[in-house]
Amino acid sequence: MKNSQIFYYSNRFKEIYNGSPWYGETVDAKLSDVSDDNAFQQPISGVHSVGEIVSHMIYWRKALIAKLEGGTFKTSMESPDNWKNIKELKTSGWKNLKSSFDESQHTITSLLEKQSDDFLKTEYSQGISMESLIQGIIDHDIYHLGQIGLVKKMVGIN
């Protein structure tokens, strides 16, 4: 099948977001009971809130979106946007943050589906293929989905 790998990765993003992943709840389900009142509650000092984690996930998704759009986006562990200030996030509000995540989801899947499998072999950065970046973002989302579940339990969202 032509472009079967691209569609595989697009479907992985869809499965994680609102499909039926083997490991349990999707991102959409996990975030469905988060509100402005509890999105930014930190369970203990030094542990990120659900809102902070979602913002962090969006930040790393921006690198993929930029590349899919033909541009670049320089990510950095040291960037203040990597883990935004909780006060700044509260000002924007949970609904805007969740909407940004939803938008990134739609953008990634629709842009991915416009690519060919050959795109996966192209270089994202020195020594890193686009396929590695895509798989990394998927892994990153799943990793943080688990964290979101723990944080929710710790602050009593379930």
Image (cartoon, rainbow, N blue to C red):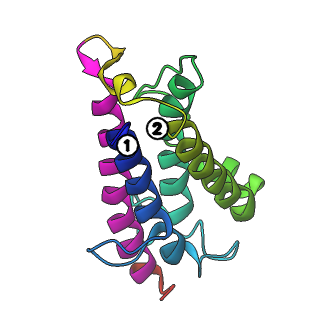
Q: Secondary structure at mark 2?
A: helix
Can residue 84 be seen here? no
Q: Amino acid at mark 1?
A: Ile
Identify whether 87 is placed above or below 15. Answer: above
Q: Quadrant of residue 47?
A: bottom left
Question: Which residue: 57% across, 60% down?
Answer: 51
Assess disc 1: are there few (<14), some (14-19) or many (≥20) residues with their C-alpha within 10 Å of its C-alpha: some
Residue range highlighted in magenta = 127-153
The residue shown at (60%, 53%) is: 101
Q: State the residue position of label 1.
A: 137
| Element type where label 1 sits in the image | helix
Q: What residue is drawn where x is 53% and y is 17%?
A: 72
Indicate which disc, 1 or 2, sits on the residue closer to the N terminus: 2
> Is 131 a magenta residue?
yes
**Quadrant position of the N terminus in the picture:** top left
**Residue 83: image x %, image y %?**
49, 42
